[in-house]
Image (cartoon, rainbow, N blue to C red):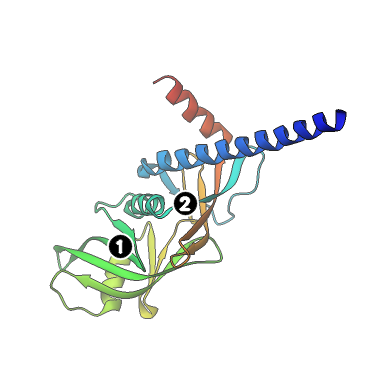
């Protein structure tokens, strides 16, 4: 009888631990969406990085395609005057506006994304369409990189665009790194670190609403 009770308690313990972890993950996802809604709060991280600390919640999140599109579209738009939209099918598409010779026109960039070792995302660019203009890919890519240099960096010669996700953080302390980004497998995994204090303030804010 005692063994049976112990097994039941053990099962309950695992159940509560799983539910607690699920709640933490849901809270971090909610906070991530809250954070990207305030892009003006983003600042460049120091090169020393963010050390692991008990004052932060650190978790690994697996997001679906729609969540990735929303988060990355908001992040790439950042503090830029122009809005960028990111979509995923068999490749990554980034659309937005770029100013060429003082004329603002629409562009669409298409390429295959890969995670970098430091948690950013690199896109090997296949094509860029810029309105009705016929311009070399490396030239247009260089212009886009200049006009969105706070968020993006480019290697125009090798046709590579970098989304500096891990090289930025919001003033509220959230840090996001790409762990896996595989379109073919539909696998999008991120390491996320959020200060406990920031989550507490967010909970208090929603509690008062």
Residue with the most extreme front position: 1
**Label of residue 63 in the image:** 2
Residue with the most extreme right position: 2
Does residue 20 appear in this view? yes
Tell me the residue at 31%/64% (across/down): 93
For residue 128, side relative to residue 178 (left or right): left
Find disc 1 in the rendering and name its residue. Answer: 94
Quadrant housing the C terminus? top left
- Which comes sooner in the sequence, label 1 or label 2? 2
Distance, label 1 to label 2, CA atoms, is 19 Å
Tell me the residue at 32%/52% (across/down): 77
Tell me the residue at 48%/42% (across/down): 29
Label 1 close to label 2 by CB (< 8 Å): no
Q: Which picture quadrant has residue 104?
A: bottom left
Q: Is residue 128 above or below residue 6?
A: below
Q: Secondary structure at mark 1?
A: strand
């Amino acid at each position: 009888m005692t063994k049976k009770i112990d097994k039941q308690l053990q099962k309950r313990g695992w159940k509560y631990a799983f539910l607690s972890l699920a709640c933490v993950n849901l809270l971090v996802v909610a906070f991530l969406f809250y954070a990207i809604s305030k892009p003006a709060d983003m600042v460049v991280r120091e090169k020393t990085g963010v050390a692991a600390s008990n004052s932060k919640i650190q978790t690994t999140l697996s997001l679906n395609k729609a969540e990735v599109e929303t988060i990355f579209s908001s992040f790439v738009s950042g503090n830029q005057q122009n809005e960028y939209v990111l979509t995923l099918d068999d490749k990554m598409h980034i659309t937005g506006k770029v100013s060429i010779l003082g004329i603002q026109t629409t562009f669409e960039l298409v390429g295959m994304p890969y995670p970098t070792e430091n948690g950013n995302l690199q896109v090997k660019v296949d094509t860029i369409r810029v309105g009705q203009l016929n311009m070399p890919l490396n030239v247009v890519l260089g212009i886009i990189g200049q006009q969105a240099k706070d968020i993006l960096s480019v290697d125009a010669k090798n046709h590579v665009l970098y989304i500096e996700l891990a090289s930025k953080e919001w003033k509220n302390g959230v840090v996001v790194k790409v762990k896996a980004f595989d379109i073919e497998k539909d696998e999008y995994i991120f390491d996320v670190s959020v200060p406990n204090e920031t989550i507490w303030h967010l909970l208090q804010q929603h509690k008062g609403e």
